[in-house]
Image: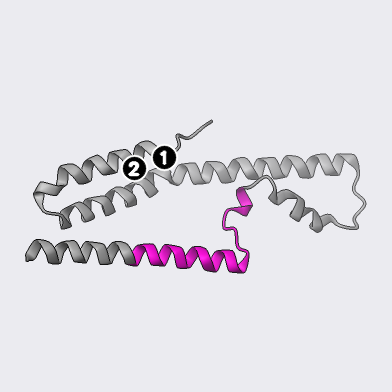
Amino acid sequence: MKNRARAVGMLLLAATFSVGALGGMAVEEAMGLDWFDFLDEDAAPSEDRLFAGMELTEAQRERIEQIRERREDRLEAYWESRVPEIQLVVDQSYGEMRAVLPAERHAEFDRRVRQLRARMPAESD
């Protein structure tokens, strides 16, 4: 009975996270939000509105493009520097989830975590 209650609890927890994630994605889609637009190279054209109607010299346009490129490099470096912190949070949560499981499920859980990590794309330089 205890194992059944634990399994039901885990399923409910997984369902809660799934519904929350799907709900968040639906709201994001409905509102037309893209949280990572600022890292996307396609974001630069929308930024061109800052200079709409301004007559810029070629030198000014080149300098502005250099500033944009430097900003992109700095943002990428910022997020890359946060990867260890983010990984620590993920690892801690996996540890907490593993602790909820009975000992006979630890090996299976560990294998699934390894499989999940193997599917994650490697960082490219």
Q: Which percent across, then down, holds residue 85?
A: 38, 48
Q: Secondary structure at mark 1?
A: loop
Q: Which percent across, then down, holds residue 26?
A: 52, 66
User: From the image, which quarter does the N terminus lie in?
Assistant: bottom left
Which three-letter amino acid code belongs to the residue tagged 2?
A: Leu
Q: Is residue 41 above or below residue 17?
A: above
Cβ–Cβ under 8 Å for marks 2 and 1: yes
Residue drawn where x is 48% and y is 66% of the image: 24
Residue drawn where x is 84% and y is 43% of the image: 61
Q: Which residues are magenta?
A: 16-39
Magenta stretch contains residue 47: no
Which residue position holds label 1? 120
Q: Is residue 101 left or right of residue 22?
A: left
Q: Which mark is residue 116?
A: 2
Q: Secondary structure at mark 2?
A: helix
Which three-letter amino acid code belongs to the residue tagged 1?
A: Met
Residue drawn where x is 28% and y is 54% of the image: 93
Q: Label 2, label 1: how many angstroms apart (C-alpha)?
A: 7 Å
Residue closest to the eye, 83 or 31: 31
**Mark 2 packing: few (<14 Cα in 10 Å), some, or many (20+)?**
few
Q: Is residue 67 left or right of residue 26?
A: right
